[in-house]
Image (cartoon, grey):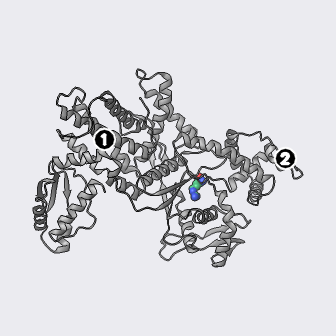
């Protein structure tokens, strides 16, 4: 159990002993450090519950806390705010326990098996900034959840099915009508056919086909027919589809690797299709399908709905299946193959309705039990300075590659030419640019939109990824320079800022739990900035390497090492790599 948790439990016990009970006591450092390190505001609540004067309650509690040597400077402010500080002895002892084993000081959660559906890149389409947000968020949640004791499977859930693929194949047909894939008489082996198209071509083909389909009804109809042919595994079309998926998938993998995003499962929408017959049977048997204009729908409206809730389109009138149906089949597949306790979907907030419909339909047919938490972990959009989804200068969709190269360029400009050679700068810029992008993405609550501000994100001085990396590298280089000096024990806390750091360090487990419960990384991002800037203040106030007082020096080095470890641990959760130099 973490120090902060056992401390909280003990305070709770002490309060119980005086005859009061506080639900959900959380110790947060107070922002009035002059009054005390922590403030308990619960006497006011207890006053209502026990019908007593809050000041009297506070006095009762303080009297009992005073008997415990861990607490000092206990005082009551205003109507009954209790200010509590921790004794240096206790703080030092706690820090040494944490420094001895950082991961032991984390509160684990009861074990659970979770699938996180994130990334969601689409085959034959360029990745865009939305995919970046999904990948960042899902990867970080996966790492955090694992650290807290969950078993997690990350699934890339590729968009490899449906209309877009039909469109791409139709356009290829228009460009290369004589390819054997479109020749019904062709008897040969398709794996030997050479496709004159690479991934870059695929990414340009899709927008062309998509525009055509909007202008030309006949073209759209042809694409629908091809989509159906793929879904029916028709020879030729299905083989071409497979080839396109393979080309695109290997490119997508590379992009994710550059982002330090790794999946346990590389499944796609199409992989759920083998469960389709069973899915249809389940819904049919349970009498949940309704006919509507030749389509089959599922009612998912609930009495408590305030907004209109359209039915879920299960099978379209032309016989093809919808995005919702693919997700239902995927739920069935996940249940059968992995049997998870929860499934989290890290997807653009604009898809919320789709998931509400899908989850309701899934529970209605008991594809998974009511206990299995299907959770939509939606995120907002990254906007341009105009407040609209971030676009290229000429108004086109901002691809992820494009975005990364813009931020790379800006980062490169800012790296120090004196400490790094051009080659080193180029290599480092890649890592730092990704850090800039990811950190800026985690800083706001996941659900809020934010504006892409390149100068701000890449600033070495601000609340940014580069600032965190630079500072963390500096901690390491201090430790390297002091390699021969002892760095085992904290013996004294000799300044205000050291006390502040101590409290921040104690707070770490609380922040991790807060983050997993909101499924947002903003608290961790904020914490990283706080601990780093506190450390930097400490660093600028002290000359660690030349300090004569040996117990001070050892304490400072141990503290540095601990902050360095915490930063590494948290940056790793955020999927941010620390370069060697900067
Ligand atoms: N491929 C989809 C898109 O780009 C995202 C997939 C999200 N996951 C899911 N299970 N539907 O919009």
Q: Residue at x 70, y 44 (%)?
A: 205
Closer to us: mark 1 or mark 2?
Answer: 1
Nearer-N-terminus badge (1/2): 2
In depth, the one of 219 and 445 nearer the eye is 445
Residue 388 shows up from this direction: no
Residue 136: horizontal and vertical position, in percent? 49, 47
Q: Are marks 1 and 2 in contact (CB under 8 Å)?
A: no
- In screen coordinates, is 4 left or right of 294? left
Question: Quadrant of residue 563 in the image?
Answer: top left
In depth, the one of 420 and 323 nearer the eye is 420
Residue 279: horizontal and vertical position, in percent? 65, 69
Instruction: Give the quarter of the figure containing the N terminus.
Output: bottom left
Tell which quarter ligand 1 is in: bottom right
Residue 513: horizontal and vertical position, in percent? 36, 56
Question: Quadrant of residue 577 in the image?
Answer: top left
- In screen coordinates, is 129 left or right of 67? right
Q: Residue at x 45, y 52 (%)?
A: 141
For label 2, the residue is: 180
Task: Report, in whole angstroms, how far the alpha carbon at label 1 lies from the one at label 2.
Answer: 63 Å
Q: Which mark is residue 283?
A: none
Residue 546 shows up from this direction: yes
Assess disc 1: are there few (<14), some (14-19) or many (≥20) residues with their C-alpha within 10 Å of its C-alpha. Answer: many
Question: Quadrant of residue 47 in the image?
Answer: bottom left
Instruction: Give the quarter of the figure containing the C terminus.
Output: top left
Judged from the image, the secondary structure of the residue bearing numbered disc 1 is: helix
Q: Name above or below for residue 477 compared with residue 297.
A: above
- In screen coordinates, is 554 left or right of 288? left
In depth, the one of 193 and 409 nearer the eye is 193
Residue 337: horizontal and vertical position, in percent? 60, 62
For label 1, the residue is: 562
Q: Name above or below for residue 52 compared with residue 451.
A: below
In depth, the one of 405 and 60 nearer the eye is 60
């Amino acid at each position: 159990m973490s120090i902060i948790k056992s401390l909280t439990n003990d305070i709770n016990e002490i309060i119980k002993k005086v005859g009061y009970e506080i639900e959900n006591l959380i110790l947060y450092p107070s922002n009035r450090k002059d009054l005390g390190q922590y403030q308990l505001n619960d006497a006011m609540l207890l006053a209502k519950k026990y019908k007593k004067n809050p000041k009297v309650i506070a006095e009762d509690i303080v009297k009992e806390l005073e008997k415990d040597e861990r607490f000092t400077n206990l005082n009551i402010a205003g109507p009954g705010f209790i200010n509590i500080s921790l004794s240096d002895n206790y703080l030092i002892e706690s820090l040494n326990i944490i420094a001895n084993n950082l991961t032991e000081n984390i509160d684990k959660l009861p074990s659970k098996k979770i699938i996180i559906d994130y990334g969601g890149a689409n085959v034959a389409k360029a990745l865009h900034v939305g995919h970046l947000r999904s990948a960042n968020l899902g990867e970080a949640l996966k790492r955090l959840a694992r650290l807290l004791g969950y078993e997690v499977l990350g699934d890339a859930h590729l968009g490899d099915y449906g209309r877009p693929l039909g469109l791409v194949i139709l356009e290829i047909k228009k460009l290369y009508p004589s390819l054997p894939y479109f020749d019904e008489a062709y008897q040969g082996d398709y794996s030997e056919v050479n496709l004159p198209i690479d991934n870059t071509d695929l990414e340009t083909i899709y927008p062309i086909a998509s525009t055509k389909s909007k202008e030309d009804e006949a073209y759209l109809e042809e694409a629908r027919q091809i989509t159906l042919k793929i879904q029916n595994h028709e020879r030729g079309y299905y083989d071409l589809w497979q080839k396109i998926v393979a080309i695109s998938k290997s490119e997508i993998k590379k992009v994710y690797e550059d982002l330090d995003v790794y999946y346990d499962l590389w499944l796609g929408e199409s992989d759920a299709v083998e469960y389709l017959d069973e899915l249809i049977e389940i819904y049919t048997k349970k009498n949940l399908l309704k006919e509507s204009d030749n389509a089959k729908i599922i009612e998912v409206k609930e009495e408590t709905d305030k907004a209109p809730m359209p039915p879920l389109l299960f099978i379209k009138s032309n016989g093809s299946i919808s995005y919702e149906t693919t997700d239902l089949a995927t739920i069935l597949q996940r249940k059968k193959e992995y049997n998870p306790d929860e499934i989290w979907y890290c997807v653009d907030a604009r898809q919320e309705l789709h998931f509400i419909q899908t989850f309701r339909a899934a529970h209605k047919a008991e594809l998974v039990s009511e206990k299995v938490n299907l959770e939509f972990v939606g995120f907002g959009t990254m906007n341009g300075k105009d407040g609209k989804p971030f676009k290229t200068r000429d108004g086109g969709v901002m691809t992820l590659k494009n975005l990364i190269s813009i931020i790379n360029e800006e980062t490169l400009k800012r790296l120090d030419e004196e400490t790094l050679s051009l080659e080193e700068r180029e290599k480092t810029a890649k890592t730092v640019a990704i850090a800039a992008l990811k950190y800026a993405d985690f800083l706001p609550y996941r659900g809020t939109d934010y504006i892409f501000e390149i100068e701000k994100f890449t600033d070495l001085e601000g609340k940014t990824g580069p600032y965190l990396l630079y500072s963390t590298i500096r901690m390491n280089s201090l430790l390297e320079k002091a390699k021969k000096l002892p760095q085992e024990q904290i013996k004294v806390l000799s300044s205000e800022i050291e006390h502040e750091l101590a409290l921040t360090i104690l707070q770490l487990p609380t922040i991790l739990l807060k983050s997993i419960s909101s499924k947002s990384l903003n608290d961790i991002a904020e914490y990283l900035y706080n601990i780093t800037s506190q450390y930097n203040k400490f660093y600028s106030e002290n000359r660690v390497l030349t300090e004569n007082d040996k117990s001070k020096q050892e304490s400072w080095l141990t503290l540095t090492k601990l902050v360095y470890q915490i930063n590494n641990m948290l940056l790793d959760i955020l999927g941010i790599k620390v370069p060697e130099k900067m």
